[in-house]
Image (cartoon, rainbow, N blue to C red):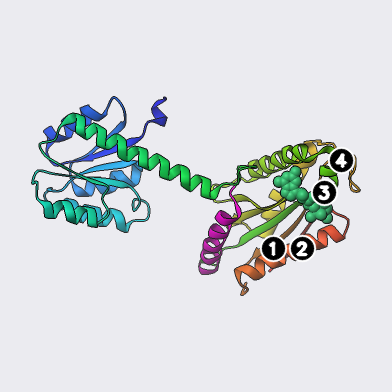
Amino acid sequence: MSFDDMQKVLVADDDAINRMVLGELLKPEYTVILAKNGAQTLERAARHAPDLILLDLMMPDMDGYETLRQLRADPQTAHIAVIFISGLDRPEDEANGLRMGVADYIAKPFNATVVMARVALHLQVVRQRRMLERLAHVDGLTELANRRRFDEVYEAEWLRASRSKRPLSLALLDIDGFKLYNDHYGHPAGDRALRAVARTASNGMRRPADLAARYGGEELVLLMPDTDAAQAQQVVCAICSEIAQLMIEHAASTVAPVLTVSVGGATLHEHGSETASAMFEAADAHLYQAKQAGRNRIVWRQG
Ligand SMILES: Nc1nc2c(ncn2[C@@H]2O[C@H](COP(=O)(O)OP(=O)(O)OP(=O)(O)O)[C@@H](O)[C@H]2O)c(=O)[nH]1
């Protein structure tokens, strides 16, 4: 396992000896981040995105409860698993912590083997949760985001664009004559071609906020926040050329000797007053026009 693959544990304790003991204990197996008070915990949690926080309940200035409340209030740190560590073995502290959603509660003085076992257990839960989230959001064949993920992101980006009056571009990309391709080369070859097109589309998206998703069958959707129509068409045009340059033979195509795609696009502009679904329908109508006009082309509208 490389250093980067190691899960990160943040140890928050005002007592230097406790920090050192816990740090030394965890260091062989995890990347350890130390914090000596609540404020440092919040700052380091946001900066390092640890997988788990061991949080001392009794700290001066900001105690564990308040630190936890502030961690939960920040979307960046809200989902980090927390284990409370307390010098007082009081059942009400344990109950309060669990009620506030902490994963576990360890009473001091702690036993090293038990601490390690509990940390390992909760980090395993974190890994499993991430895997489930990934499975729920990723399309198995193409490994692009799936339709559910796209719907979530599109809704959020559309609201953000309307509020900030920044442009938002959306493109629907559909393989030309894919039924003929499957009929001619077989379904497994169709799957391979679809994966290659998906990879090319995804590689062609340049910014971190861009999203390529599989919308259905052989239809992909590309979402480009903060991108105007001219910029988006440039990106999409480059992706279409890359797809043609894959030179995936398509002998049955009525369009070209290689696999091509058609694209319908729409851009939400500063003055746009439509809804997210109307914008999607506009892109879909343009895809239909691109197909009607002979395929292997892009039709775009600026709204
Ligand atoms: N191999 C493979 N084929 C798929 C997959 N999803 C959808 N398809 C096929 O894609 C084809 C889409 O057919 P149509 O909607 O008629 O579109 P088309 O043949 O591409 O024709 P145009 O889009 O009009 O150019 C169907 O034959 C589907 O079976 C998939 O995951 N793998």
The amino acid on which the numbered mark 4 sits, given as a three-letter code, is: His
- The residue at which mark 2 appears reads as 286
- The residue at which mark 4 appears reads as 184
Residue numbers of the magenta segment: 145-163
Secondary structure under the numbered disc 1 in the rendered image: strand
- The residue at which mark 3 appears reads as 179
User: Mark 3 vs mark 4: which is more N-terminal?
Assistant: 3
The amino acid on which the numbered mark 2 sits, given as a three-letter code, is: His
Q: Is mark 4 within 8 Å of ligand 1?
A: no
Judged left or right of residue 286, residue 168 is left
- The residue at which mark 1 appears reads as 266
CA distance separating discs 3 and 1: 26 Å
The amino acid on which the numbered mark 1 sits, given as a three-letter code, is: Ala
Instruction: Give the percent coordinates (x, y) of residue 221.
Output: 66, 54
Q: What residue sits 52% from the left and 45% below the top?
A: 135
Quadrant in the picture for the C terminus: bottom right
User: Mark 2 vs mark 3: which is more N-terminal?
Assistant: 3
Q: Main secondary structure of the magenta part?
A: helix
- Disc 4 crowd rating (10 Å Cα; few below 14, some 14-19, many 20+) is some
Q: Is residue 102 above or below residue 245?
A: below
Q: What residue sits 62% from the left and 50% below the top?
A: 213
CA distance separating discs 1 and 4: 33 Å
